[in-house]
C-alpha cells in the first residue's frame, strides 16, 4: 500500500504541542492531557502523554508534527452500519411525507425488499463504487474504523457479494473495516413467508459458508415482530458460535421481545437500538459485558418516541456506544458528529458519553478495544486532529466539520 511505504520501518513519528483527549479508561472523563504528545512506530502508539514525559530516545531523529495546540482524539469508530447497499429509498421518504403509511409504501414495492432487489441487481464493483461515497463521507470526519453489515442479499451469493464488497472497501481506503453477517435481517420474497425454513438456510448453509471463507468478523440478527423471533435468532447464534464468531443483535427497536437478554445470554459484543429494553434487559447486559449501541439516527428518522433507557444503562453500568446505523431505509446518515449531537439532544447523553461512544466503547462493541479506541501505548496510531477550542464543540455543532487531519495506523 502506498500509504505504508511513506515511513521507514522502525521510524518514529511524533505529534507534539497537542491537547489530548486520550479516552483512556483508567483516566477520569476524557483523559485530558494538556501540552501532550503522541509517538508512533510501525503504526502503533509507543507513547501518549505529557510532552515533558516523552522519553528523549524517541524524539531523536523522529519525524515530528507540530499540532499547534490542536485537540487530538482517537480516530472515530462507526460500530454499526449497513454501508454496503445499492440505490436509496428517497422515493419512500417522499411518499411518507405525502402521508403514505408503511403498508402503502410496502405495497408499492418499498421497504427492505426494495433494497434487496437493488442489491441483487448490482455487481460487486457497483456496490463498492456506491458505498465508497458513503465511506468517504464518514472518513472526512475522522473515522478510522467502520463496521459494515450484510443483510440486503439474503441468499448465499448476495450475502457473500456484500461482504466481499465490504472487505474491498478496506483495501480501497486507509481505514479498518470489520464485517458482520446479518443474513437474518429480513425474509426474502422467495422464502414465501416461511421464516423457519429461511432461518435453517441461514444457520446451516449461509453462515457456515461465509465463516469458512473468512468473510465475517461477527454475526448479527434482527429480533423483531416484523423480522425474526428470539427462538429463531437463537438458532442463528448457535450456528455463529459453532463457527467461532461473536454475535451482536438488533434488539428491542420497535417492541420488547427481550432481545437484550437474548444477546446477553450469548455473551454478545453489543445489543443495538434498545428503545424498548427494560430493566431486566439492562441488568443482563451489564452482567454479560454486552455494550449498548445507541442509534439516534434511526430513532429520529422513523419519528420514534420511545427513548432507549439510558438512565438504566448508567445505573447498571452498561457501556454505551453511539453509531450511525447508516442504511437506506431508517437512517440515511453518514455523519458521526451529527449522530453525537442527536445522542445528546434526543437521549441526554453527556459530551463525555458521546465521545466515548464513538471511540472507546465503539471499539469495545467490535471486540477491538485492545487494538484501537483510545490514545494509549500499544494501540494502533489512529488519530483525529481537530480545529476546536474544547471537545464539546464536536457534539454541539450540527453540519460543521472541524477535522484538521486524520491519521490511520500512523499515516
Ligand atoms: N433495523 C432498522 O432500522 C433497519 N434494519 C434493522 O434491522 C431497517 C433497514 C431498512 O429498512 O432497509
Ligand atoms: Fe441496523
Image: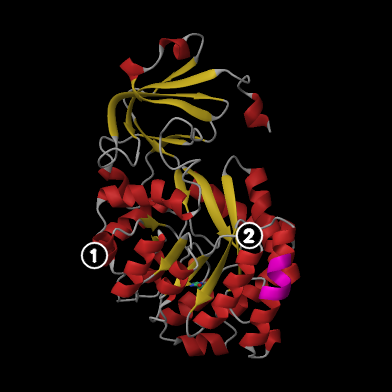
Q: Nearer the viewer, residue 371 or 188?
A: 371
Per the rendered image, the range of residues in magenta is 203-208
Q: Which mark is residue 188?
A: none
Q: Name the element at disc 2.
A: loop
Q: Is residue 132 above or below residue 104?
A: above
Instruction: Determine whether, in the image, residue 23 is placed left or right of residue 225.
Output: left
In the figure, 142 relative to 178: above or below? Answer: above
User: Is residue 231 or residue 63 the one in the foreground?
Assistant: 231
The answer to whether mark 2 is within 8 Å of ligand 2 is: no
Q: Residue at coordinates 57% horizontally, 45% vertically from top-left?
A: 176
- The residue sitting at 56% across, 68% down in the picture is 88
Tell me the crowding category of disc 2: few under 14, some 14 to 19, or many 20 or more residues within 10 angstroms, Cα based: few
Q: Earlier in the sequence, mark 2 or mark 1?
A: 2
Q: Is residue 122 visible?
A: no
Does residue 95 belong to the magenta stretch? no
The mark closer to the camera, 2 or 1, is 2
* Residue 376 drawn at (x, y percent): 41, 33
Q: Which quadrant of the figure has residue 213?
A: bottom right
Q: Which residue is mark 1?
A: 311
Circle 2/circle 1 CB separation < 8 Å: no
Q: 113 or 399, which lies in front?
A: 113
Using the image, determine if residue 193 lies above or below residue 144: below
Residue at position x 63%, y 30% from top?
Answer: 3
29 to the left or right of 136: left
Residue that carries the numbered disc 2 in the rendered image: 244
The Cα atoms of the two marked residues, 2 and 1, are separated by 34 Å
Residue pictured at 24% horizontal, 65% vertical: 311
Amino acid at each position: 500500500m502506498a500509504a505504508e511505504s511513506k515511513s521507514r520501518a522502525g521510524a518514529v513519528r511524533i505529534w507534539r504541542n497537542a491537547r489530548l483527549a486520550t479516552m483512556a479508561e483508567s483516566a477520569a472523563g476524557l483523559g485530558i492531557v494538556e501540552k501532550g504528545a503522541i509517538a508512533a512506530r510501525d503504526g502503533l502508539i509507543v507513547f501518549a502523554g505529557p510532552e515533558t514525559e516523552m522519553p528523549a530516545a524517541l524524539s531523536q531523529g523522529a519525524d515530528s508534527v507540530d499540532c499547534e495546540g490542536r485537540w487530538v482524539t482517537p480516530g472515530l469508530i462507526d460500530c454499526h452500519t449497513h454501508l454496503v447497499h445499492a440505490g436509496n429509498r428517497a422515493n419512500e421518504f417522499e411518499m411518507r411525507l405525502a402521508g403514505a403509511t408503511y403498508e402503502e409504501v410496502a405495497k408499492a414495492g418499498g421497504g427492505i425488499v426494495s433494497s434487496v432487489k437493488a442489491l441483487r441487481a448490482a455487481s460487486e464493483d457497483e456496490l463498492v463504487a456506491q458505498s465508497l461515497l458513503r465511506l468517504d463521507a464518514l472518513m472526512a470526519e475522522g473515522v478510522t474504523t467502520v463496521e459494515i453489515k450484510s443483510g440486503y442479499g439474503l441468499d448465499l451469493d448476495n450475502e457473500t457479494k456484500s461482504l466481499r464488497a465490504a472487505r474491498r472497501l478496506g483495501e480501497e481506503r486507509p481505514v479498518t473495516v470489520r464485517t458482520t453477517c446479518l443474513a437474518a435481517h429480513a425474509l426474502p420474497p422467495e422464502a414465501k413467508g416461511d421464516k423457519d425454513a429461511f432461518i435453517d438456510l441461514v444457520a446451516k448453509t449461509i453462515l457456515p459458508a461465509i465463516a469458512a471463507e473468512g468473510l465475517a468478523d461477527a454475526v448479527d440478527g434482527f429480533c423483531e415482530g416484523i423480522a425474526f423471533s428470539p427462538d429463531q435468532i437463537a438458532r442463528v447464534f448457535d450456528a455463529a458460535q459453532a463457527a467461532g464468531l461473536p454475535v451482536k443483535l438488533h434488539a428491542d427497536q420497535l417492541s420488547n421481545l427481550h432481545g437484550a437478554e437474548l444477546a446477553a445470554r450469548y455473551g454478545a459484543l453489543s445489543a443495538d437500538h434498545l428503545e424498548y429494553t427494560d430493566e431486566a434487559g439492562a441488568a443482563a447486559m451489564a452482567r454479560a459485558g454486552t455494550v449498548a449501541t445507541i442509534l439516534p439516527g434511526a430513532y429520529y428518522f422513523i419519528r420514534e418516541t420511545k427513548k432507549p433507557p439510558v438512565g438504566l444503562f448508567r445505573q447498571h453500568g452498561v457501556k454505551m456506544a453511539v453509531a450511525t446505523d447508516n442504511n437506506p431505509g431508517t437512517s440515511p446518515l453518514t455523519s458521526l458528529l451529527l449522530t453525537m449531537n442527536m445522542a445528546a439532544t434526543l437521549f441526554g447523553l453527556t459530551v463525555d458519553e458521546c465521545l466515548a461512544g464513538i471511540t472507546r466503547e465503539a471499539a469495545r462493541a467490535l471486540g477491538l478495544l485492545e487494538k484501537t479506541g483510545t490514545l494509549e501505548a500499544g494501540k494502533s496510531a489512529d488519530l483525529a486532529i481537530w480545529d476546536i477550542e474544547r471537545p464539546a464543540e464536536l457534539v454541539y455543532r450540527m453540519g460543521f466539520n472541524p477535522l484538521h487531519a486524520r491519521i490511520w495506523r500512523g499515516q
